[in-house]
Image (spheres, rainbow, N blue to C red):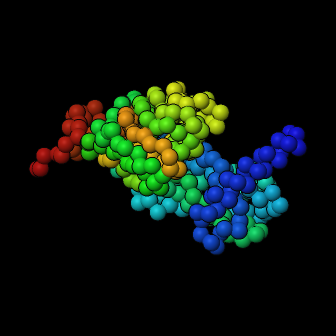
Amino acid sequence: MTRTTRTHLRQVVVAAALMALAAVPAAHADLAVQHDSTVVTETAGNGNGIPEPGDTVAVTENVMSVDPDQVFSGVSGTLATSFAGATVSSASSAYADLAFATPVGNASPYSVAMSSTMECGVAVPMTLSLQTSAGPTGVGFDLPTGAAGSFAAYDSAAVPRAIPDGDSLGVSSDLTISGSGGRVKGLRVRIGHITHTYDGDLTLILISPDGRTVKLVGGKGDSGDDFVDTVFDDNAASTIRSTTPAPFTGTFKPAEPLSVLDGAPLSGSWTLKVVDNSSGDIGTVDAWGLNIARAICAPQPSPQPPPPPPPHDCGNGNGAGNSKAKPAKPQHDCPKK
């Protein structure tokens, strides 16, 4: 790795750390340790390898230091959850030293048992409390459940909506999905058409029914006009960059990952918020929609019935030496004499 590459990596990681630390309690704000990734392995359940209600899973939570000037030693972790449908049975593990930008996982897996009555697709909130040579800190992450089903398309009927010029409150266009349940396991956002004469003024934000937010794009396109058939998908090859020409027709990664909405309720009101951050140009939200994959879970195996009781000879004897033994009357009570 060249010096330039290392310097760039350090700048990116430290910038991400500063954003993350702004959201943690002040007592932990001086420890630059953050979540990197989570590995989940089914250890008991239906055997399909997907974390689901009724399963027990082994969890490896990878964390890393984002402090280029400090190595955290003597690290140990304790995993917990406030979610009523999950129980942490193996909660403690040691960690190797945390060096800058190097992910490290717990030495022994944590174990989490999930209730068979919990809803499929729920993202179970977990908290990892870390003790380090520099003091304590905490890392939060979600334990996903379920697999993605087929995508279904939904379109907003709350259009057109005028975008206020230079107004930080912006405009909101709702998309209401009826139904009584289900959780999100995959999401794409379709911007069919936004009319505007200066795309660089605009910020687009998606808000889920439970209030989670994802920034799709902001401040891109300079004086270019409109969004036309723009799709935001975590699996896209690239984001909308400063050099990407409007009207951004195609598929792009959002500025923030849509995967943070996994586990959100599918039914309810979804909102596209569009903010014009500078005065002088106007526009409208003309068409937008969502493609959503519902979380699906396989059933747990049915419990095996207990074996039948052994037959009883009702006092007639069934030994090999009794040639006059009568056949036993299996699996029912003997008659009273």
Q: Quadrant of residue 294?
A: top left
Q: Is residue 34 left or right of residue 9?
A: left
Q: Is residue 322 left or right of residue 39?
A: left
Residue at left offset 64%, top offset 57%: 19
Residue 256 position by quadrant:
top right
Q: Position of residue 272 (x, y in %)?
A: 41, 44
Q: How many marks?
A: 0
Q: Nearer the viewer, residue 36 or 220?
A: 220
**Quadrant location of the N terminus in the rendered image:** top right
Residue 6 against residue 233 in the figure, above or below: below
Where residue 180 sits: x, y (%)? 26, 45
Q: Position of residue 73 (x, y in %)?
A: 79, 63
User: Which residue shows up at 38% across the image and 48% down it?
Assistant: 172
Q: Residue 67: give x, y in percent of width and height.
A: 77, 59
Q: Nearer the viewer, residue 213 or 136?
A: 213
Query: Does the rendering let one see residue 301?
Result: no
Residue 265 position (above or below residue 125): above
Tell me if I can see residue 329 in this picture: yes
In this orientation, which residue lies closer to the viewer: 182 or 7? Answer: 7
Q: Is residue 306 above or below residue 235?
A: below
